[in-house]
Amino acid sequence: MKIRFGYVSTAITLWDASPSKTLTFTRYQQLSEKERKHKLLELTRLNLAHTLRMFYFNLAHEIELYRLSSSIVPLATHPEVFWDFVTPFKKQWKEIGQLIKKNNLRVSFHPNQYTLFTSTQDKITNNAVIDMEYHYRMFEAMGVEDRGMMNIHIGGAYGDKVETIVRFHENLKRLPNHIKKAMTLENDDKTYNTEETLIACEKETIPLVFDYHHHMANLCEPPLESLMPRIFQTWDHVDLIPKIHISSPKGEREFRSHADYVDLEFIMPLLTMLKEIGQDVDFMIEAKAKDQATLKLVEDISKVRGFKRISGATIEVK
C-alpha cells in the first residue's frame, strides 16, 4: 500500500510565485480597451509561468499530486468580460500539459463555494455550469481533460435537505456529460456529511473525495469503517486512486479552521484504518503551510513504525 502526498495551488517556499494574481472587475472597468486586453494577457501569462514554476518545484521534490489554481485566468467567467484565454497562450498551456503527462502527475481543480447545484435560482445554476466549463476548458488547453478532475461540494440545505438533494440531482442534469465525468464531490464540515455525500455520489456515479477534517467536524451516524469501502468503490469507474483531503483544526474553538501544519495525532486514527484496509490512496494536504506542511507530514509519518518513506512525497505502508 502506498500514500502519495500533494498540496494546493502555491508552493510558499518559492518567492513571489502565486499563480492566482488577479484583476477586479471594478479596476477592469477603469481601464481603456487597450489597457484591459494588456492587463488580462499580462496576468494570465504570469500565472501560467508561475504554475510552470510550481510543477518544476514539485518534480524536484517528487510531489506527484497538485491542485491547480482556479484563478489562473482573471475574469474568465465574468459575463461582461468573457475572453479567449487559450489561443494567445497555446504554447504555455501545452508545455504545462506535456509536463503533467510525461511525469504522470495527478492534477485537479477545486471551483469555489459558489459553484453549486442546489440553488433555487436558475442564475446560480447557470453560473455553476459556466464555471465548470471554464475549468474543463483549461484541462483541454493542457491536453489533460482525460485525467484532470474538478471537485465541488453539494452546497447549502436551504432549510430542507431532502428537497434540496432532489433539486441537486435535477440541476446537475444541466452539466454536460463530458464535464460531469471529470467531477468529484466532497463531504463538507457543516451541511452534507460523509454518508449523505456518499449517497449522492453513488446515485450519480461520481467519485467521492473524502475530507477527514470535515468528517470529524460533521460526523454521521454510521462509523467511518463501514463507509470507507463504499467510498473507495465510487472510484472504481475511473482510472484513479481514491483521494482524501487532509488537514487538522486550528484549535478547539476554531475546529473547522485549517491549521498551518497537519497534526499527526489528529489523523492517526485514519492512517491506522487505511493501513488495515490496504488501499492505495492520495492525500491532498489542505494545511495553510501548503508545500511545507506536505513535506513535514511525510517526514512525520515516516517516523511511525510500519510507514516507510520511499520518495520525497510518497509513503509505503507495510
Image (spheres, rainbow, N blue to C red):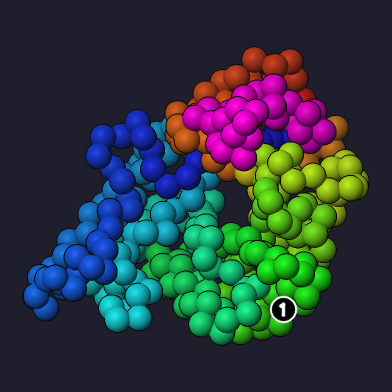
* Residue at image coords 31%, 46%: 18
Residue 249, position as x, y percentages in the image: 61, 32
Q: How many marks?
A: 1
Number of other residues with Cα within 10 Å of mark 1, as a class: few under 14, some 14 to 19, many 20 or more: some
Can you see residue 166?
Answer: yes
* Residue at image coords 54%, 40%: 286
* Residue at image coords 58%, 81%: 121
Span highlighted in magenta in the image? 246-274
In the image, residue 89 sits, relative to residue 254, either above or below, namely below
Q: Secondary structure at mark 1?
A: helix
Q: Amino acid at mark 1?
A: Arg
Is residue 188 or residue 104 the one in the foreground?
Answer: 188
Q: Give the residue at mark 1.
A: 167
Quarter of the rendering occupied by the N terminus: top right
In the image, residue 101 sits, relative to residue 285, either above or below, namely below
* Residue at image coords 39%, 69%: 141
Outermost residue toward the front in this view: 159
Can you see residue 209?
Answer: no
Residue 198, position as x, y percentages in the image: 79, 59
Is residue 291 or residue 82 the one in the foreground?
Answer: 82
Residue 156, position as x, y percentages in the image: 65, 64
Magenta-colored stretch includes residue 308: no
In the image, residue 178 sits, relative to residue 73, either above or below, namely below
Residue 269, position as x, y percentages in the image: 78, 29
Relative to 144, 118 lies left or right: right
Quarter of the rendering occupied by the C terminus: top right
Magenta-colored stretch includes residue 262: yes
Q: In which quarter of the view is residue 77 placed?
A: bottom left
